[in-house]
Amino acid sequence: MAFKISEEKIYIPDYSGIVQGILAKMIEEGKVSGRILIHKGLISVFEQLSAQGRAVGMTGLEEIRRLRMFHDKGLITLELIGDKPRMGLKEEEVISEINYSIREHARALGATLVTGDPVQYRIAQAYGLETLYVAPREKTRLEFEKFFDEETMSVHLKEGVEPLAKKGKPGEWAYSVLSNKPLGKEDIERMANEIIEESRRRSDAFIEIDRVGSTIIQLGEYRIVITRPPLSDGWEITAVKPVKKLRLEEYNLPEELVKRLGERAEGILIAGAPGMGKTTFAQALADYYMRQGRVVKTVESPRDMILPPNITQYSKNYADLGELHDILLLSRPDYTVFDEMRYDEDFKLFADLRLAGIGMIGVVHATSPIDAIQRFIGRVELGMIPSIIDTVIFIRNGIVDKVYDVKMTVKLPTGLKEAELSRPVIEVRDFLTGELEYEIYTFGEQTVVVPVKKLKGKPSLLDSIIENVRKILPDAEVSVEDNMIVVAISRSMLKNYNRRVKRLRKLEEKYNIPIKIKII
């Protein structure tokens, strides 16, 4: 235990006081001097997190290194106190135990506790400790922001490479070199540490994911991805921000589409290729529903939508999907925007909430509008798709390029001839023209997505398979019964059949439609 000399000022930072760079900042500004006591447990925690490749660990060690530099310059006297934490505890438990030990040292020495954690501040007040609390602050301009201008969507910074920026508008992006001087490793590390420190101080910033080798941060309007070895071959920062925020009225949508969005559409998919403006349109739609007096919430990873405070934004990274399911089901918003749906669990949560009666707006990557619907095939029962999705909006070059209406009906699929082959069929129609473009149905064990337009004047898939079977066994009788192709052959043909059975089985495997042999 350290001892206090009379009239001596002592400061003890907790975990947040180090990670947020509070103490080092105040020493630089001349607001703090004297003895600084660092708990050994903090160094141990930062060491362990750094070994795991976690950015917060590297930031913590860098801050302690800065404090040591101030000590060497004679600005402060730096000392180590306390013991290493117990083994076998979870990260949160270790930090809590160290913070408790730090409070005890502060109480025994009459030292000032330095913290940026509001919970720790309240506990310190309950203890009657002298506390230097720095509340989350608002925006300050960081070094990486100098690479952005009004036309820049993303900035790509990597060690050993010239800084690049992606500029323009959806569909007309172009990369430009911002400087002929390649960035060094220390440049990227410095900017990364500055971003992480700022994200822990600001109220509009969140560290969404901190993994071995990568960190994803939402810092105000910027979505920032930091990668480092061994995940990447060098330090890299990719920062993205929306170029423009639009209202739904600025898209000049047809009146019938606006009416559908306002009255009927409750299972909406917004699809498009990366950088085409899907999230921008989703923002506009969420804002539109909010202005219509609807309760709107979002599920994002990370939370990069720029929305009014009336709309609550949930992070998928700070709760499991079961917890989000309970929250949304119990709070019953009119609409939930699910941004960046990628995994099976995302689609299942979307489907479950939609079937519970919540209006859902999903954002998915797709190169064509039908691809967005196909993302649900195999993840939910085929017959449930029209109950989950009723409207597909495809965004290309920042505008609404295509709108599909999705419905279920019972009919004979286009291209089939036998009336007994009628079945439930999902019809995908162009919403504005009413033209049927795709049919989705099951045949045998296969789910078939048929482009109806392309079928005109061409044989159907089933007709093509039957034609191939007849080429293999010209003398056989081929028919369709109970969702399978039945090939009737005489006993005298068995010898030919045995020689050609492999070709038939390959045809069966290729189309996933059963072929049954019947002896007559």
Image (cartoon, rainbow, N blue to C red):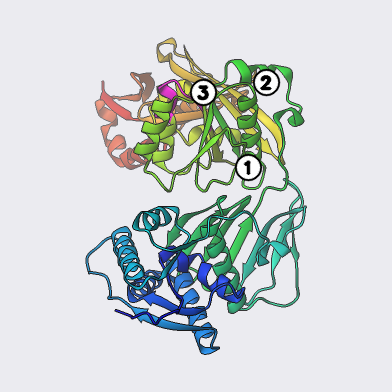
Q: State the SS at label 3.
A: loop
Residue 474, can we see it? Answer: no
Contact, mark 1 vs mark 3 (Cβ under 8 Å): no
Q: Which residue is mark 3?
A: 334
Q: State the SS at label 2.
A: helix
In front of the other: label 3 or label 2? 3
Asked if residue 353 lies in the magenta stretch, the reply is yes
In front of the other: label 1 or label 2? 1
Q: In which quadrant of the rendered view does residue 37 lie?
A: bottom left
Q: Amino acid at mark 1?
A: Ile
Contact, mark 1 vs mark 2 (Cβ under 8 Å): no
| Whether residue 475 is situated above or below residue 338 in the rendered picture | above
Q: Which residue is mark 2?
A: 257
Which dot marks residue 306?
A: 1
The answer for how far apart the CA atoms under marks 1 and 3 are is: 19 Å
Badge 2 local density, few (<14 within 10 Å), some, or many (20+)?
some
Q: Amino acid at mark 2?
A: Leu
- Foreground residue among 367 and 114: 114
In the image, is 303 to the left or to the right of 356? right
Q: Amino acid at mark 3?
A: Asp
Q: Earlier in the sequence, mark 1 or mark 2?
A: 2
Give percent across and percent down for residue 512: 38, 34
- Foreground residue among 517 and 428: 428
* Residue range of the region highlighted in magenta in the rendering: 351-361
Give percent across and percent down for residue 340: 52, 43
